[in-house]
Image (cartoon, coloured by chain):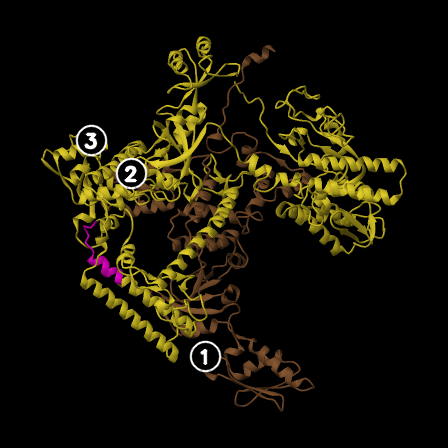
Amino acid sequence: METFIAKKIASIEFGLMSPKFMKEMASAKVVTPELYDKEGYPVDGGLMDIRLGVIDPGLKCKTCGQKLKECPGHFGYIELARPVVHIKFVTVVLDLLRCTCRSCGNILIPNDKINKFRSELEKIGMEMGLDEQRKQVKQVIASLKTITKCPHCKEKQMKIKIEKPTTYLEDEKRLSPIEVRSRLERIKREHLPLFGINPKSAQPEWMILTVLPIPPVTMRPSITLESGERSEDDLTHKLGDIVRINQRLFENINAGAPEIIIEDLWDLLQYHVTTFFDNAVAQLPPARHRSGQPLKTLTARIKSKEGRIRHNLAGKRTNFCARTVISPDPMLNINEVGVPLVMAMKLTVPERVTEWNTNFLKEFIKKGPKEYPGANYIIRPDGRRKKITDETKEQLLEELQPGFIVERHLMDGDISTFNRQPSLHRMSMMCHRVRVLPGLTLRLNPAVCAPYNADFDGDEMNLHIPQTEEARAEAEILMEVQTQLISPRYGLSIIGCNQDAITGNFILTKYLNLTRENAIDLLVAVGVEDFSKLPNKNVLSGKEIFSVLMPDDFNFQGHARHYKEGVNDPDAIVEIKEGKLITGILDKNNLGDGSGLLLRNLHKQYGAKQMVDMLGKIYRMGIEVLFRYGFTITLSDLDLKHEVQDEVNRLLEEADNDVAKMIENFHAGTLELLPGRDARETLELRILERLNKARNDTGAVVAKNADPDSHTLIMILSGARGNLINLAQMSACVGQQALRGGRISKGYDDRTLSCFKKGDLGASARGFIKHGFKNGLEPYELFFMAMTGRDSLMDTALRTPKSGYLYRRLANALQDFKVEYDFTVRDAGKKIIQFAYGEDGIDVSKSEGGKINVGHIIRTT
Amino acid sequence: MKRELLEFKDKLPLKILEELEQGLPDKASPARIKKIADRVYEEYRSSLAEPGECVGLVTAESIGEPGTQMTLNTFHFAGVSEMNVTTGLPRLIEILDARKTISTEMMEIFLNKPYSRGKEIKNIAEGLKETTLKEYIKSISINVAETRMRIELKDQKLKDVNLNPAKVGRILHKSLKGFDFKVEKDGAMRIKASGDDALNMIYRVKEKIKDIYIHGVKGITQVLPVKRGEEYVIVTAGTNLKEVYKLPFVDITRTTSNNITEVEKFLGIEAARKAIVKEILKVLKDQGISIDHRHILLVSDAMTMSGKVLGVSRYGIVKEKPSVLARASFETPIRHIINASMVGEKDELNSVIENVMINQPVPIGTGLPGLITKKRVDEKKK
């Protein structure tokens, strides 16, 4: 299977095909609409002629002598009895006819002025595109007022109209394609560039077809149904129509049939050729199957998302990949992926046999495909692939020698790339090391959920096994998880502790003191083997235990989440001196993703590999702490003391009263208006403002009185999950439900729900929920919640395709911008976009939040 | 600048250099300064984007990915609760499309001293607003028998914007041809129609006359003076830079619009580029999404590179691409191929997507470097 690139495509040129060229490239002339003879063998000169390629097993192509799948297929052609217009060039031909003389073929611009306009027009063509250039030609001619009389031969010009889709009319008289063609032939070649046509690659008369190329059989294969019937491709059907009509036209012409019959057949031929190119022309009824469904012809094959270009050419498919449900496993390293055994026995890694690994690889062959770790195939130097079975095993073992390739099962430590859709950024596909595990799911460390945006509610992910040395090297060096720690979006770590890991470390560093045994037990579970950093004490604080994970020469100073300027709270300042956590509680600010400055510093100082290792340990530490400590939340965390409940009630009542007063003022007309608003709008804004204040006030009261040692609060304070608003909503007051930026106002006449009075503008009648989730909502409050809930679902459903399209456009527009060797940013045409990337040339993923930390360097030098 | 830093003047970007100079301790010895600067330089070198880095795609990812997190809620209160502005994803799409008309046009008008201190701020603001006659009408009375209409105006409101009935009369006169029109001594307008259809005409003109433009800057529908720190700024809904720049009390150097097309027209392409950056940053900040400014710079540079503002769409940036296949792979593939065939375009295959299509290495990143070897000498033997 040695593949060498013998040739490289350097460029692709586009142009029109001349009739001569079509005939030359064709390997068969199609003359009959029949497809197969009685034996089911392709007819010579038919559309399935075996000179056009083969689609049946066993047959050999008459042109190249190759068999099915080897023969690429060959074009044929048919001679059209009468020329027809190519539907895609109709507008161009029309412009050409209108802008050139009907008798002498000169452009309708006087000779002395041609050169003046030439450069002007070409510039427009370069800048605005072809269509614009042709429009400009028409404008020039209109401005020169030569539209009615040729400036060269003084011939009077007629008005040329088009009757869609393909008929040209000159002064209401029909121009046949033959006439059109002869006029196009007459156009002076030197005038063509004015229309943006390059005479070297396109002659205008070629836009009228006299010969039609027949695409190879291989691009329109027929399917044999179970019943043995053949079902032909849409294109073959269409071509059959064309050939049939063409033959009839020939016969009628030769027989000297009346003009009307010939015209009708000609029109029919035009219709068939048109729909062969495009079956969605606005003015034509689409050609249909007998079942009534429209045929899929050339245009439909190429365009749109399911078309050739976007589906087959820009989108590639791979072998050696797998997909299944994912589940979390914090005991894996962050750069590992747990692969189920069944997958590992199907996915293989090709390994070339050399003198030095022959025995090693023979072991795999001996085990075969059914025992792990074995091998599934061996590939001989001539490219033949042999399956390893119990029967062939012995023989293959014998003939195995350097140069062979063994496809062995996936093993621990192999390179793989792991991906979750939608792949919105480059961290959606990262390289992980394989860990073969029992079970049927792919497993990953929950710390890498953030970059994949994965959770475990049934998400599936894909795994790919690179098959060449280059691919493996690139994956390992450029894509491995530790190389992707810093997001290129904002220059901070996107991988960090989350949820339980944060809670655990928070509890450890805030509350815990462990006996030496327990501490060592914890550390062993985390994966630490060296306990020399533990102080020689019998009771160890959580901070001391955490310090074991830090490198000895690490210094760090940061703020915890509850840090406030000017308040002296040692817990709020995280200080690590020489690898010892002296003060501070570790929470999301320092361990979390996105914010984790501690992690960012570790990364900077010790490199990606060490940081990933430490992060894994910190993560496991958090989880192990929770295993031992026990962690759950209870309903009583939400209980409010009597006086707090009274306070909340008082606040809500106050708000209610205020709102009532405002409504009174509104009705009395004494409301002070906000600038640019009428009374009703002012009222709404005021009420909204007041109610939000009420909600925030109750929230503050609840937060102030909540027990900071309750588990709910621990989660909130550590930043692991939830926030104080969530707590307030659960225990005190849910607050205003907003719909389109205002209070709820839609529903029945003048009221939101039928249980309210008409015209009620009060708080609860317009979506203010004054109860908390724990105490339960009133029925109408539940309805309001359902309304906003539905609204947000709609929002999400509408947003996804919009942002997806924006992303596609951005990616398409910017995809070939790259940094050149001179550090300028240029596009594919080598046009300079920026002289230095981002004006200073710094790669965001190598920076710290987009900056170089000058202050740090000054402090440490 | 310190002598030791001079040699880094061409090596380091200005911003880093400034930060370095300001951050240096006062008593630092020359040797230490040199050492620090060397380290900063080393750090800078190692953070440079490497040749071949596909920065465009990284930018597209960085802006596209958080798009899913943005809200679709069109309206949002910007700063003060009185003005509605389009934000979030719709606004971002609008900016990147380079739309000619945007959904909520806004201006921020900065004022010259002493007006920026709040002098006559209310009058100035009100004076900017486009007003029609109906806002000055106190009452309209129609005398059916004599087919006559009498309009009384609000005197105080006219005075506020430096108008008097005579001036209003002159404005009205132009659009009241065919009517007997007079400004009465007490400041009221008198309109009389004659002819068979006189009464109908009077009623028709009564509605028409209400919408006649009287005063202010056309296009500005709402004004709001806002205090920003020490200074008063007038935020307006609707834009008209051309007219606003003519006003004597406006600080032209800082007053801008959020309509990029308008900024391009009156201030040029560089200003438009800055406006794009500013507007995108505004959206992102509003949504609480952090994207490095380099990405936004790249997008706005790409949009303005050609000298006019191009949208990120098939009519804008994508159209400018040199490769036929790259254009065809985006949208309307057939049109691109047909046009290419007439021009005889040649696709040099030097961007990403064409090479993906034909299974060749992509000239980006690790696909960029080639290997040059010496030809074997033994070819001579042949």
Labels 1 and 3 in the same subunit: no
Nearer the camera: disc 1 or disc 2: 1
**A68 or A856, which lies in front?**
A68
Residue B86 shows in the view: yes
Any mark on residue B34, and which?
Answer: 2
For this orientation, the residue located farthest to the top is: A398
The residue labelled by disc 1 is B160
Residue located at (76% from left, 27% from top)? A45
Q: Label 2 sits on what residue type?
A: Lys
Q: Label 3 sits on what residue type?
A: Val
Q: Which residues are magenta?
A: A698-710
The residue labelled by disc 3 is A524
Badge 3, how many Cα within 10 Å: few under 14, some, many 20+? some
Q: Label 3: state its secondary structure.
A: helix
- Position above or below: A439 against A167: above
Q: Is residue A701 magenta?
A: yes
As measured in the structure, the alpha-carbon distance from the residue carrying label 2 to the one carrying label 3 is 47 Å
Q: Is residue B234 magenta?
A: no
Q: Label 1 sits on what residue type?
A: Asp
As measured in the structure, the alpha-carbon distance from the residue carrying label 1 to the one carrying label 3 is 81 Å
